Amino acid sequence: MDVASPSAAGLRTFYDGLFQAYGPQRWWPTQDADNPRFEILIGAVLTQHTAWTNVEIAIAQLRDAGPLTAESLLAHADLPALIRRAGPHNVKAKRLRALCEWFVARGGFEALAGMDTPTLRGELLALHGIGHETADVILLYAFGRPSFVADAYAFRIMERYGWSAGARNYERLRKRVEAVGPVDDAPFYDELHALIVAHAKQRCHKSWPDCRACALQARCAQRGVNAVR
Ligand code: SF4
């Protein structure tokens, strides 16, 4: 099956359309002004298959229990109880411990800043419970690396737009977008991901997308869309 790929100009038009519709999204939301990057690191795990409101509660409980650092989290014998609101707490506690142990062993943000992005992505993907989407969220928002988060919302919108078809393949879509996206421009990918999430929630719904009011309608192929609002 032929699969159209975005061009650099096409991706910019797509981004501009969403930006004009929704404005700056100012991601990633954090509570801890002292250590926001570490909060993003653990928030990326806590938010797996869980509503953000529950993640905020879990992070607030962690903050009440001690400083939001890898060392502090590893010292919590009751870590599963502290994050109970964020879904399967035993599973996520195990994932958080693996992430924190790696973070400490690698010397924290300062030491990891010297690691190139492919190596850093590979190390994250080798950790227990870290898949492609979580790895790219961490790379982008915690490490400021230009990475495209090819999540389910991105697939839905880009498939409909005409940029992806056939079997979904995370790495293929990520690389297609990064191949034409601006080089070394993490703020672009930061905003792009947040805008895609906003668009998926406000217009390009899973069922009955609101195409008549969509900022992308003039260029969207509406592939696979059978009914609109
Ligand atoms: S025109 Fe419809 S299908 Fe295309 S991006 Fe907009 S809401 Fe989604």
Image (cartoon, rainbow, N blue to C red):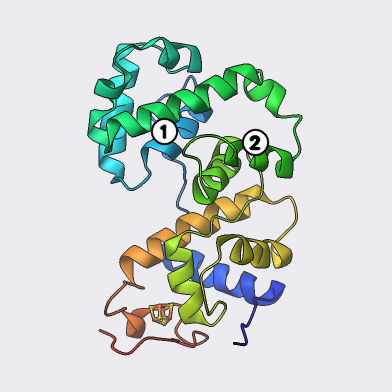
Which mark, by number, is residue 73?
A: none
Residue shown at the point (33%, 11%) measured from the top left: 77
User: Mark 2 packing: few (<14 Cα in 10 Å), some, or many (20+)?
Assistant: few
Question: Along the horizontal axis of the image, is 63 left or right of 220?
Answer: left
Residue shown at the point (74%, 50%) measured from the top left: 184
Residue shown at the point (34%, 33%) measured from the top left: 91
User: The residue under label 2 is which amino acid type?
Assistant: Glu
Q: Circle 1 is placed at which residue position?
A: 30
Between discs 1 and 2, the one toward the N terminus:
1
Of the residues tagged 1 and 2, which is closer to the observer? 2
**Distance between mark 1 and mark 2 Cα atoms:** 24 Å
Question: Along the horizontal axis of the image, is 82 left or right of 1?
Answer: left
Q: Circle 2 is placed at which residue position?
A: 123
Asked which secondary structure carries label 2, the reply is helix
Asked which secondary structure carries label 1, the reply is loop
Above-or-below relation of 138 to 206: above
Residue shown at the point (44%, 14%) measured from the top left: 74
Residue 174 lies in quadrant: bottom right
What is the x, y in percent for residue 45?
42, 37
Q: Quadrant for ligand 1?
A: bottom left
Q: Nearer the viewer, residue 22 or 177?
A: 177
User: The residue under label 1 is which amino acid type?
Assistant: Thr
Q: Say if residue 219 shows up in the picture.
A: yes
Q: Say if residue 23 shows up in the picture.
A: no
Above-or-below relation of 128 to 222: above
